[in-house]
Amino acid sequence: MNAARPGMRAMLDRLAGGETTAIALVRGCLDRIAALDPGLRAFLRLNPRAEEQARDADRARAEGRAGPLCGIPVAVKDNLATAGLVTTCGSALLRDFVPLRDATVVARLREAGAIVLGKTNLDEFAMGSSTENSSFGPSRNPWDPARVPGGSSGGSAVAVACGMAPAALGSETGGSVRQPAAFCGVVGVKPTYGRVSRSGLVAFGSSLDQVGLLAGSVEDAAALLAIVAGPDRDDATAVPRPVEDYASACEAGVTGLRIGLPREYLGDGLAPDIAAAAREAAGRLAAAGAEIAEVSLPHTPWAIPAYYVIATAEASSNLARFDGVRFGRRVDPGAGLQAMYRATRGDGFGPEVKRRILLGTFVLSAGYHDAYYGQALRVRALLRRDFLDLFAAGFHAVLTPTTPTPAFRLGEKVSDPLAMYLSDVYTATANLAGLPALSIPVALSGGLPVGVQVLGPDFAEAHLFRIGAALERAFGTFVPPAAA
């Protein structure tokens, strides 16, 4: 790990050895934020109690009460509830909303001794692939500030890439952790649906949404997942299944693993440098002992249409709660309840959120439900079946590019929603199928990071960490010039 971007493991070793303190680590992160964030906008707000909490962590360690992440600073995407700290979802509608309790994943980090540095920027209500839909302005890519960092977890990816935090929480509905991880050159993990509690994650598409993780290394991502994973009585979708030793999996190697290279992910629309990087990654895994074979996932071309029907339908339902009555700001022209609803939602939601609500309402409407929403659900089942058949045939994972291109320029796709949506063409399948996926940087193209992803069977995160760690050993880590 680059000295300018120490990871969680290095920080924990230094804390255990008495070489540093939690307060020193937090102040170091805050200093980097002060130096770098004005030009990158990774954070929307900082935790005013971070240094106080770091002192508490140092006392806990001195008294023998240190949790597994005691003193480690982390960043949190601003659609995860943080008690006493404003949670906006990147929306003007929630500019002053302060939750009464933490999201389960935030609570678990705090219980482990981690310190929340602050809340990171995102596309409004996590709807976007570039962070340009934030009501508070876009984040910028640390490799080239004229380019996007990806989205919707762009702020979290920027924070980790630049060493403002060694790790961060994000969220995924169609690739919103893995795509920015690829664009910013860090590791991004989307667990199996149900592996991590969604309680306290502000809902976009409930059957697709998941909490995800961003870190500078595979080992750190594995350690973070082990802390936040597991059942939760506050989330009926959180599966009561034991959490594995993901850290040990990073050392297991890939000998004996069968990995598929789907031809549908290596065709038209893929940048040549990224295609070459994916094939090079496959070659390195083969050299490390894995068996690589070309395979087919035939329903892949229909993933994006199905995703944007299902996701918008669920968004239309979930965002109905933001009406000026219970949550967020209210705009009341004094002309009755309906006028208040219209004014609040019209003024509070940005253009992309309005577009998705309208699309979702349309596909759920009488006369169109079966033609669009019902058909999308059938396609979703076929996409999952493609993967299940492949895994039943003895494959442990598939390897694909994470994105079709490197990071694009700010403003390049804002006026073309379809082009923006297609940036998720390789990531949305994992969300539709509910499968775990991990993105890892493997190359640079024109000075910008390129990522590949591995997808595996339900609850096979350990296999993904084995593969990700092997790729990391082969290609190293990637640190942007801004963080050097």
Image: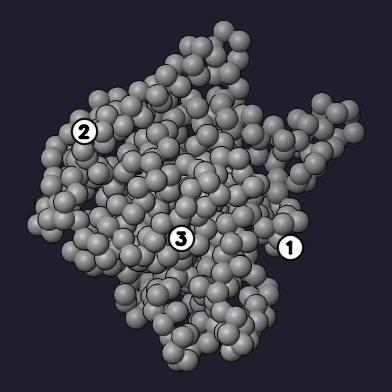
Q: Residue at x 31, y 52 (%)?
A: 464
Residue 70 rendering spot, x and y as whole percentages: 54, 76
Q: How crowded is mark 3: few (under 14 residues within 10 Å), some or many (20 or more)?
A: some
How packed mark 2 is, by other alpha carbons closer than 10 Å (few <14, some 14-19, many 20 or more), is few
Q: Name the disc covering residue 477, or none.
A: none
Residue wearing tag 3: 226
Precedes in sequence: disc 3 or disc 2: 3
Residue at image position (80%, 41%) is: 326
Residue type marked 2: Ala
Element on which disc 2 rests: loop
For the point 32% across and 77% down, the residue is: 2
Please name the residue that numbered disc 2 is placed on.
393
Q: Can you give x and y, in whole percent of width and height, for residue 31 in the image?
A: 52, 80
Give the mark toward the camera: 1 or 2. 2
Seen from the viewer's position, the closer of residues 61 and 262 is 61
For marks 1 and 2, give the CA distance.
50 Å
